[in-house]
């Protein structure tokens, strides 16, 4: 009778250990998948994330310089193209606090 209680008590501990181990492994796998997925995504912040983004000219460019609206922020833009107010442009590169933009042919 004493042996029976020892076996039953140990079995419940073993089952508990197995359940906690399986939950821990599942959490580890899910976390690993999410981390790998996050590393594969494109950069969407910082200067690197602005290259290739469409913007809108908020004024006529004079002397190849003007202001553009990018993601709700106003930036100084420079361009070789003749850009007028409300033209759609694309960010080609970032030079300090200025964006080099190119006009999109509509």
Image (cartoon, helix red, strand yellow):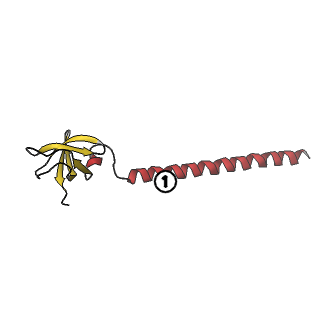
Decide which of 6, 19 is in the foreground and name it: 19
Q: Residue at x 82, y 48 (%)?
A: 8
Image location (x, y in percent) of residue 91: 22, 50
Give the quarter of the image for residue 78.
top left
Q: Residue furthest right?
A: 1
Q: Residue furthest bottom?
A: 106
Image location (x, y in percent) of residue 97: 20, 38
Q: Residue furthest top?
A: 97
Give the structural element (helix, strand or loop) at label 1: helix
Position above or below: 74 against 32:
above
Q: Residue at x 24, y 40 (%)?
A: 74
Decide which of 72, 43 is in the foreground and name it: 72
Tell whether 26 sits left or right of 34. Answer: right
Q: Residue at x 34, y 52 (%)?
A: 42
The residue carrying pointer 1 sits among few (fewer than 14), some (14 to 19) or many (20 or more) residues within 10 Å by Cα, namely few
Q: Residue at x 60, y 47 (%)?
A: 24
Tell whether 61 sits left or right of 20. Answer: left
Give the quarter of the image for residue 76.
top left
Image location (x, y in percent) of residue 88: 22, 53
Q: Residue furthest left?
A: 63
Decide which of 72, 30 is in the foreground and name it: 72
Give the position of the C terminus as an image quadrant.
bottom left
Q: Which residue is label 1 attached to? A: 33
Image location (x, y in percent) of residue 99: 19, 45
Count up the numbered dots: 1
């Amino acid at each position: 009778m004493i042996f029976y209680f020892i076996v039953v008590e140990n079995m419940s501990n073993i089952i508990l250990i197995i359940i906690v181990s399986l939950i821990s492994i599942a959490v580890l796998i899910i976390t690993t998948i999410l981390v790998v997925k996050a590393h594969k995504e494109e950069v969407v912040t910082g200067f690197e994330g602005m290259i290739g983004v469409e913007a809108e000219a908020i004024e006529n460019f004079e002397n190849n310089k003007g202001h553009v609206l990018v993601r709700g922020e106003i930036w100084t833009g420079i361009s070789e193209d003749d850009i007028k107010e409300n033209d759609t442009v694309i960010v080609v590169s970032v030079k300090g606090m200025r964006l080099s933009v190119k006009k999109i042919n509509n």
